[in-house]
Image (cartoon, rainbow, N blue to C red):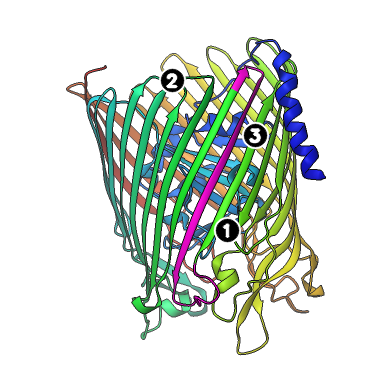
Amino acid sequence: MRRFFLFAGLLALSTGGLKAQEEQMADSVLLHEVATYAPYKKYQAGAKVESIPAEQIEITETGSLTDLLSRFSPVYLRSDAGGLATIRLRGTSADHTSVNFGGININSLTLGQSNFNSVPLYLFDGVDLQYGSSSAVNGSGSIGGALYLGLLSNWTNGQRVHATASVASFGEQLYGTKLYFGNGKFESVTRLYYFTRKNDFDFYYAPNDRYYTQRGAVIENKGLLQEFNYRFNQKEWLKTAIWLEHDWHEKQPEMSSSIADNLAIEDLDNKHIRFWSEYENGKRAFKYKAGLGFVHDMQVDAGRTAQKIGTDRLIAELEGKQDFNVRLGYKVGLKYVYVKPDVYAYSSDVIEYEQRTDLYASAFYSPFNRMKLTLNLRQQFVSNFTVPFTPSIGAEYRLFMTDKEVLKVTGNVASSYRIPTFNDRFWGTQGNPDLNPEKGMNYEIGFQYQYCSSWLQSDVKLNAFYMDVDDWIEWRPTGTNSEFEAENRSRVVSKGIEFQSNNELNWNQVRLNLRLNYSFNPTEIKEDSLKSMIGQRLIYTPEHVGNVFLMASYRQWGIYTDCAYTGNRQVDYSGNVYNPEGNVLDAYFLLNAGLNRKIELWKQSFNLRFSVRNLLDKDYQNQLNYAMPRRSFQFSLATDLKFLNNK
C-alpha cells in the first residue's frame, strides 16, 4: 500500500504540473560549479551536493582523492602513509559511500569500498561530493553519501597537450600527460599517469625514544583513461571511456614491526578495467540515453596468485526524461548488472553469479517561483536476496531574492540501503548468506545564503542532519578458533551539523579565496546484541573535523595556505575500568602552504608550483600505530600547449 501511494504521488505531480506557467526559478549564485554537478541536483531538492573548486583540484592534482578530501572538505578519511585510505562520510563506514564513474559504482563488490589513495585526481576534470543518503538515486551503498568523478567533453577542434611532472620528498614522483585531438565533432582524449613514492620518512618511536626510517611502505600506481567522443549534432552524441588501472603497494607495517630486524614485507596488487559507453539523444521533448559498461577487478595479496579475489561486471542502463516546462519534469530508468565472482574463498555451490535489476523514477515540480519539490523512487531486485523499496523527497524554498542575494531553506528525507558485500555473505565458512540489508533513514534541513556583486561572491551553508541505520553489519569474533563472522549486530545513529563558507573577492588584479569547512558529527550505537556496546561511538569517526583554505592571486602569481583539524578518534572497543573509552587517537592539526607562478611563452602556458606539506612538522597518527610523514616539499611543472582551430 505504501508503494502504491508513492507512485500515485509521482503520477499526480506529472499531471498537475501541466497547468504551471513556464516561469523558471531564479538562478542561484554559484561559485565555479563543475558541469558534473547539475544532473544530480536537478532531481534532488534539499540534498547537499558540492563541487570541489577547480583551484583546489589543481593544487592536489598530483595526488589522490585522499589528498583532496582530507584537505578541502569536512570529511574524515582513515589512512596510513599512502597505501590504503577509506572514507567515513557523516560517521558511516567505508562501504557506505558510492564512488561513481559514468554509470559505474567503482566500489569493490567483495569489500564494498574503494581505496581513495588509488583514485588519481590527474585523470579527472571534476569531483562532486554528495553528503547524506542517496540510495534512491545511486542504489545500494549510498547511505553516507556519494562521490562523482567527472569528465568534461571539450569537443576539441585541433590539438592540445597537457603534461605534468612532480617530485617531492620521500621519493615521490608523478608524471602525467593528457592528449586531446579532435575536429569539433570527433574527440579523442588520452590521459596517462605514473606515480611512485618510497615513503622512507623518519618517525619517532616513543617506547625506544628514538627515530627510525619507515620501511615496507612503497607505492607504485599507473593508469590510462582513454575517451572517444562523437557528436552527431548539438543534441546527440556518443561518449566512451576506458579506464585501466594498476595499483601496487607494500602493506605498511606497524611501527613496532617496521623497526624489527626480521621485517617481512608483503604487498597488495590490484588491477582494474572499467569501460563505460553512453549514447544520448536530446533532439525531442522526450530525451533518452543508453549506457553499456564492463568492470574487471582483480586483487592478489602477497603474490599468492592461487588466492585471487576478483569480480567481473556487465552493466546496461536505459533512461528517458522529459521536461514539460521549466516547472515540471521527470525521468525513468532501468539498470541491469550481471556479476561473476572469481574468489578462491567462495564455493560455487553458494554463489556462481548474481543478477541485479534497478527500476527508478524521479520528478521535480515547482508550484511557484520560490519553491521546488522533488521525488525519487527506486526498487532493486537481486537474485536470491530481498532489497527494500527506497524513496526520497526533497524541497527548497527561497525566503527572499534580490538581484544580488538569495536566502534559501532546504529539506530532505531519504531512505537508504546497502546489500551486504560478497565477502559478507559468501567468504568461506564465515560468510553469512542470511544477512539482512542495512536500512537507513536520513533527515536533513539546511540554510544557504548567497551573495554576488562585481567584487564579492559568497556562498554560506549550514546543514543539520540525523541518520538512523538499522541492521548495521559488522565482523565480530565468534569465540571459536579466533574467527570472525559477519552479522547484523547494531542500530546506529549519526547526527550533526555542517558549516561551509566559500568566499571570493576580486579587486583590480587581486583575487582572494577564503573557504571554511566544519563538521560536528557525534555517532552512537543505539542498539546492539552486546549490551556493553550500547552508547559507544563508532570507531574512527571524529566528532570534529574542520579546515580553512586561503589563496591570493595577483596577475601570474598565486600563494595559498590550508590547514586541517581532525578530532580524537576511538579506535577500538577495548575499554575497561582503567581505560573506559578504550584506545583513543589524539587530535591533530596540519598546515600546508604553496606558491605558484604561471608563465606565458610563445602563446603557451606553463605553471610552476612549490609547496610544503605538514609545514609545522607535526608527529601524528591517522591510524593506530602507523607512522605518517612529517614535513615534506614538492615541486611541480605543468604545461598546457594548445594548437586549436576554434580559439
- Cα separation, mark 1 vs mark 3, equals 27 Å
Magenta run includes residue 572:
no
Give, as a three-letter code, the residue at label 1.
Ala
Residue pointed to by mark 2: 510
Q: Quadrant of the N terminus?
A: top right
Q: Are marks 1 and 3 in contact (CB under 8 Å)?
A: no
The mark closer to the camera, 2 or 3, is: 3
Q: Are marks 2 and 3 in contact (CB under 8 Å)?
A: no
Up-down: is 9 above or below 536? Answer: above
- Cα separation, mark 2 vs mark 3, equals 44 Å
Horizontal side of residue 342 vs 609, given as left or right: right
Give, as a three-letter code, the residue at label 3.
Ser
Element type at mark 1: helix
Residue pointed to by mark 1: 94
The mark closer to the camera, 1 or 3, is: 3
- What residue sits 28% from the left and 30% below the top? 187
Q: Is residue 372 visible?
A: no
Q: How many marks?
A: 3
Quadrant housing residue 38: top right
- What residue sits 61% from the left and 32% below the top? 501
Q: Is residue 212 visible?
A: yes
Q: Nearer the viewer, residue 88 or 384?
A: 384
Residue pointed to by mark 3: 362
Residue 202 picture location, percent across and down: 39, 67
Q: Nearer the viewer, residue 255 or 614?
A: 255
Element type at mark 2: strand
Mark 3 Cα within 10 Å, few/some/many (few <14, many 20+)?
Answer: many
Q: Which residues make up the magenta segment?
A: 323-352
Residue 102 picture location, percent across and down: 45, 42
